[in-house]
Amino acid sequence: MKEGFRQSMAWLHTWSGLLVGWVLFMVFAAGTASYFKDEITFWMKPELHAVSPTAAPQAKATETAVAFLQQHSPDAPRWFITLPTEREPSTSVLYLKPPPPAGAAPVERRRRFDVALLDPATGQAVTAPRETRGGEFFYRLHFDLHYMPAIWARWIVGFCAMFMLVAIFSGIVTHRRIFKDFFTFRPKKGQRSWLDAHNVTAVLALPYHAMITYTGLVTLMFMYMPWAPQAAYKDHGGTEAFFAEAFPGGGRTQFKASGTRAPLAPIAPMVAAASSHWNGAPVGRITVHFPNDANAVVSIARAGTQRLSYDQPSMQFNGVTGAQIGTFGDVPKAAAETRGVLYGLHIGRFADPLLRGLFFLSGLAGCLMVATGLLLWAVKERQKFAKTLKQGGRIGFGLRLVDGLNLGAIAGLPMAMAAFFWANRLLPLDVADRGEAEIRWFFIVWGAGAVLGLLRPTLRMWQAQLALGALLFVLLPVLNAFTGPAPLTVSLRSGPNAVAGFDLVVIALGLGLAGAAWLVERKRRKAISKQAAATTPPGLAASGQGS
Amino acid sequence: MGALLLALVFAASLAGFCALSLAMDRHSEDVFGRGSTPGAWRRWLQLGGTVLLCVSLGASLQAAGSAIGWVLWLGALTAAALATVGLLGYAPRRFHWIASAAAAAALLGLLACLLLAASGT
């Protein structure tokens, strides 16, 4: 049997999409949420909503942060200071604790450092917020998954992303009428409508889909394909040397303490010098290696705004004399810059709120593309069983499995995401390992949705899960009003904008889910009336339709 | 100027896609009823639509710089195209009014931007 190119591509598109579709839906949904991970984290820390940090110039914020660190941890091996931005108005500091004396029990990784949020103007620590992973959970989930080693997860997600790339390009070949059907969406036409929705969400956001899938692979390319640097640098210091040479933007990172104390030079002038070296671009992060030691070194990296590339140049200063040691990554090589731009495009850190919103919208289109694709497979497959069903038979195991997985993945995931936010506000504050407890609720709800979906993949179940997800999302602003100091009525008028934005977006998402539940209801009624028409005499069917 | 340019990016891409869709028989029928075709207007709608998308690109590059401008433009195109599809599907009777309004806004915005640029130099 000889098949045309297009048929074989259609086959490839169908199966490459189906096999990894459920993971991809989660990756798309969690990745889309990650565009607003800072805002999500902020919403999940209501203690911070009533605090409005006073804006201060970078020099002042640096001074106050250093003063705080000198007071709390003058002997730390390293300080990290992230200067405030428009999105994150507080200065955030992280300081490593001095290593335990030799022979003492090793400290758990998470207990080896402390973090604090500071008011940039005063350097006072703002109220300690509740323990939560916040938006960071979705960000990690979309490539590290959960409950498994990150390396395995990254291989799984990378495998799925590769399939996605195959599905995208085979999909372009399969779709014969990209331009003729560019604007075509015919609602209320059964399979036709599903195909239209799949095509529209895929084609109209195609630049995004192709970009995000390809660049997603690029972000982890040295893990997936480490062989070239491994071979080339085999006798020249290994991959470590390769990274130092290829991406010099970070400067040197390995330093040794001298053990002799020496006062730390003022850092604000270094920030000013770095900023003027970058033509006035703001400074992002300051790293102080061995503060108050004779070998102290201060690294200053540029803020990741205004440029596409992920790699940012940095400068290093002697921490005692304040003299400049060097500048790094000012003129990146073409290959490194290419990777930097591809990486930067994926995480979109350069995006202002408007562009971030557009990324979010395209991400939602991606979710819908994957979801409609999965449903389309089931719709088409079901037609093969039309005759069997009519004779009272059952659908095949494969279709039943796909139906169940579709239900659990597509309707269950939004429900679980909403449950995560509910757990954030309702769990007692003193629960042990609270961040992990919130995450557990996410997986409990998702797991329940998936199990119920596999047991009873019916329209009723679709409707129930979509409606529950809708309810949980729409009511989040109400929950916020009762458990936080910034209900929508306040946040809309006087901020914080991130809280108002979160509340409005979850309402919109909830209404979208409610719309989907309503569509299922209509389909269910139609199916019932059709069944009634088939089993009852024609005279009774007409009266039955009205109920 | 910044906000004006951004408004121009979106108005021009929406108007551009509306014009391009009306140049197609199927969507002409959606909007103006069965059997209607763009006829002699087709070329003009296609030309106008293309020009509007180019205006959108120009405004986007001006607003966000030559690197991020491209990303903004593609994002705006996606949003505008999705809006066009939504309008065709769910508001075909009002479609030509909304399209005309978008086109008018784009032209006014373009004019305002050019005037501002001219007075600025």
Image (spheres, coloured by chain):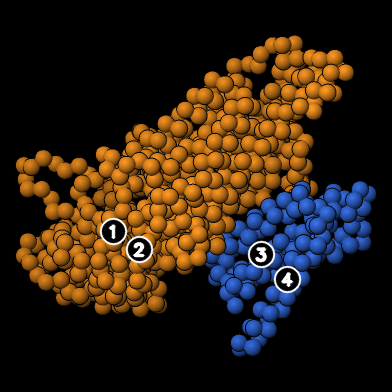
**Is the Cβ of the residue at disc 1 closer than 8 Å to that at disc 3?**
no
Position of the C terminus of chain B, as image quadrant, is bottom right
The orange-tinted chain is A
Instruction: Give the foreground label among 1 and 3.
Output: 1
Residue at 69%, 79% in the rendered image: B112
Q: Is the same chain shared between marks 1 and 3?
A: no
**Is the Cβ of the residue at disc 2 closer than 8 Å to that at disc 1?**
yes
Colour of chain B, in one word, is blue
Query: B1 or A240: nearer the eye?
Result: B1
A146 w.r.t. A261: above or below: above
Q: Which chain contains the residue that carries disc 2?
A: A
A247 w.r.t. A21: above or below: below
Q: How dense is the environment of label 2, judged by Cα within 10 Å: few (below 14), some, or many (20 and up)?
A: some
**What is the CA distance from the residue labelled 1 to the residue labelled 4?**
47 Å
Label 4 vs 3, first from the N-terminus: 3
Q: What number is the disc on residue B10?
A: 3
Q: Which residue is mark 2?
A: A51
Q: How dense is the environment of label 4, judged by Cα within 10 Å: few (below 14), some, or many (20 and up)?
A: some
Q: Position of residue A351 (x, y in %)?
A: 50, 62
Q: Which residue is mark 4?
A: B105
